[in-house]
Image (cartoon, rainbow, N blue to C red):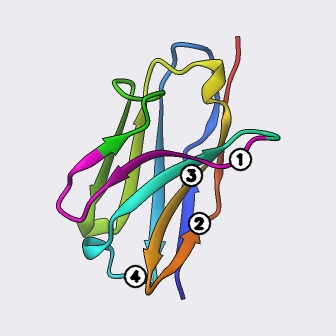
Amino acid sequence: QVHLVASGGGSVQPGGSLRLSCTTSGINFKIHPMDWYRQAAENEREWVASISSSGGTNYAESVKGRFTISRNNARSTLLLDMSSLRPEDTAVYYCHTIRQGNHFYGRGTQVTVSP
């Protein structure tokens, strides 16, 4: 059974930083591309960043240059370093992967950016 659990969220002021982690189980982590998504209240879930099994990365334009996605294959953990946070980054953040054609979004973590 696939389990993805995000953590590390919190409340920060604009310009602040946070590091999100996603612990995983039930997948062969090192071979899976992984993603971060986020969902703000009353909005649809939106893609934030992706990392391939080999470490190649892609970012949404809204976070490019401010967020960094990385992975620790030894610990089966996905990371998201967020800096220069803005109020519009406020959302619940989820990690995501696909296994055998099925999409998995784990338990999210709330990020709130406000003065």
- Which picture quadrant has residue 19? top left
Disc 4 element? loop
Label 1 vs label 4, nearer the camera? 1
Q: Residue type at mark 1: give it.
A: Glu
Q: Amino acid at mark 4?
A: Ile
Dot 2 corresponds to which residue? 105
- Label for residue 27? 4
Q: Residues within 10 Å of mark 4 (few under 14, many from 20)?
A: some
Position of residue 35 relative to residue 102, above or below, is above
Residue 78 placement (x, y as % from top left): 38, 57
Give the percent coordinates (x, y) of residue 67.
39, 32
Query: Label 4, label 2: how many angstroms apart (C-alpha)?
Result: 13 Å
- Can you say whether 53 is above or below 86 in the image? below
Which segment did they paint magenta? Answer: 43-57
Pointer 1: what residue?
Answer: 44
For mark 1, give the secondary structure.
Answer: loop
Badge 3 or badge 1: first in the primary sequence: 3
On residue 7, the disc is 3
Q: Secondary structure at mark 2?
A: strand
| Picture mark count | 4
- Between marks 4 and 3, how big is the CA–CA gap? 19 Å
Q: What type is the residue that disc 2 sits on?
A: Tyr
Judged left or right of residue 77, residue 14 is: right
For marks 2 and 1, the one nearer the N-term is 1
For the N terminus, the quadrant is: bottom right
Please tell me which of labels 4 and 3 falls first in the chain.
3
Q: Is residue 115 left or right of residue 19?
A: right
Quick one: 85 or 43, which is closer to the camera?
43
The nearer-to-camera label among 4 and 2 is 2
Query: Which quadrant would the C terminus be assigned to in this image?
Result: top right
Q: Nearer the viewer, mark 3 or mark 1?
A: 1
Q: Bin the neighbour count of mark 2 within 10 Å (Cα to Cα): few under 14, some 14-19, many 20 and up.
A: some
